[in-house]
Amino acid sequence: MSTGSNDRLDLAALESRVDELIKTIDSLASENEALRNQQAALTAERATLIEKTEQARSRVEAMIARLKAMETR
């Protein structure tokens, strides 16, 4: 009798552990998706900032060139 009772307890413990693992997997999958979305947004923001930096650099270089041209006059 005690073996059957132990088997039921073991099975219940195993079932509980499997349920915990499923919850953990679901939680990690959700977190992973959120992190991937955040990474995509940050990558897009980085690209935008790089483009703006290049535009600003070009404008500054053009201003410097104009100032140098004014000095030589």
Image: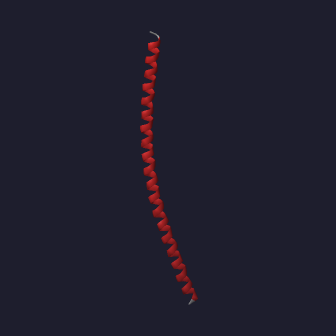
**The C terminus appears in which quarter of the rendering?**
top left
In the image, is 17 to the left or to the right of 48?
right
Q: Nearer the viewer, residue 47 or 12?
A: 47
Residue 2, by quadrant, is: bottom right
**Residue ID at (47%, 67%):** 23
Point out the residue furthest to the right here: 2
Residue 45, by quadrant, is: top left
Task: Tell me where residue 32 appears, x and y as whole percent.
Answer: 46, 56
In the image, is 2 to the left or to the right of 57?
right
**Residue ID at (45%, 17%):** 67
Does 69 sit above or below residue 10? above
Does 58 sit above or below residue 42? above
Q: Nearer the viewer, residue 11 or 27?
A: 27
Task: Tell me where residue 36 appears, x and y as whole percent.
Answer: 45, 51
Does 14 sit above or below residue 60? below
**Residue ID at (42%, 25%):** 59
Q: According to the image, what is the colour scheme of the structure?
A: secondary structure
Q: Nearer the viewer, residue 16 or 71?
A: 71
**Residue ID at (55%, 79%):** 10
Q: Nearer the viewer, residue 31 or 60?
A: 60
Does 1 sit above or below residue 61? below
**The N terminus appears in which quarter of the rendering?**
bottom right
Task: Tell me where residue 43 appears, x and y as whole percent.
Answer: 44, 43
